[in-house]
Image: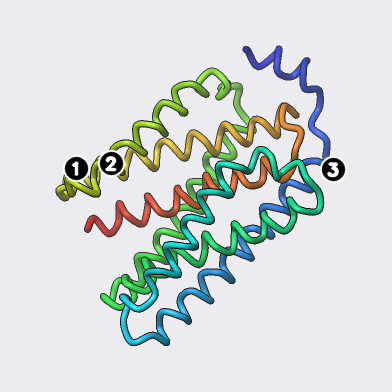
Amino acid sequence: MNVTHVQSAGGQISSTFFGRVIMFFGAAVGVSALGAYVGFSQIAGAASLGTLPGLMLVAMLVELVLIFTSRWWSQARPLNYILFAVFTFLSGFTVAPIIFQLVLQGSGALVVQALLATTATFIAAGLIAWRTNINMFRFQGLLTMGLIGMIIVGVLSIFFPMGGLVNSIYSFFGILLFTGFIMFDLQRIRYNVAQNEIEVALSLYLDIFNLFLYILRFLDRR
């Protein structure tokens, strides 16, 4: 698939579709921030970080279920609006322990640095994806294989903890991978290939959310 073929097949981007994707993406960021605030408040009000593991585990399991079923529920209205909000809220809620732990250790500035770096990376990736003729559709298989590999390594790291250098390399590859996914999803919008605005907004949100986590992990290196 080349760029010319994508353009002829998908046609010109619909300003309405693009606007709806951005609207849902902005809503996702806002709801996620609300979830992080609620999670942070819950943890800060608890006696210790170990008092809420059950709630966090349930939230993570619900997140996984919503991710694996998103292709189905993103098509069903008005259920897609509700589950989209639930997922983004839970993603913010479950990242709260990481933020709380960093603040507790006096490393809260890393969160701000990671947010700024994520924003800068997103802008740069967006400009490349939107302004150049680099065809990210050619790399879809490679990106998928990279994601599977990152998941496998991540699971193995639970049983075999990474050293500092390995952790930095792993985080760096995660940054590259999700930067690639951002470019891929933006070109899905650019060439009007995607049809479902909620699915695209959710995919773009996950790209940026994971990019933020890997940048934060790279900066922290612990």
Whole-angstrom CA distance, mark 3 to mark 2, is 38 Å
Residue drawn 72% across the image and 53% down it: 24
**Labels 3 and 2: the sequence-earlier one:** 3
In the rendered image, residue 114, in percent from the top left (x then y), is placed at 41, 58
Q: Residues within 10 Å of mark 3 (few under 14, many from 20)?
A: few
The residue lying at 37 percent from left, 41 percent from top is 174
Label 3 or label 1, whichever lies nearer to me, is 1
Q: Quadrant of residue 170?
A: top left
Residue 171 percent coordinates (x, y) = 31, 45
Left or right for 210, reference 74:
left
In the rendering, which numbered label is found on residue 170? 2
Q: CA distance from mark 3 to mark 1?
A: 44 Å
Read off the residue under disc 3.
16
Check whether the beta carbons of the residues at disc 1 and disc 2 lie within 8 A of each other: yes
Determine whether the residue tagged by mark 3 lies in a helix, strand or loop: helix
Q: Secondary structure at mark 1?
A: helix
The spot of residue 122 in percent (x, y) is: 53, 46
The relative height of residue 125 versus residue 85 in the rendered view (above or below) is above
The span from disc 1 to disc 2 (Cα, nearest Å) is 6 Å
Q: Residue at x 40, y 83 (%)?
A: 44
91 relative to 146, above or below: below
Q: Tell me the crowding category of disc 2: few under 14, some 14 to 19, or many 20 or more residues within 10 angstroms, Cα based.
A: some
Q: Residues within 10 Å of mark 1 (few under 14, many from 20)?
A: few
Judging by the rendered image, the residue that carries numbered circle 1 is 166
The kind of secondary structure element at disc 2 is helix
Give the residue type at disc 3. Answer: Thr
Query: Which amino acid, by three-letter code, is at mark 2?
Result: Tyr
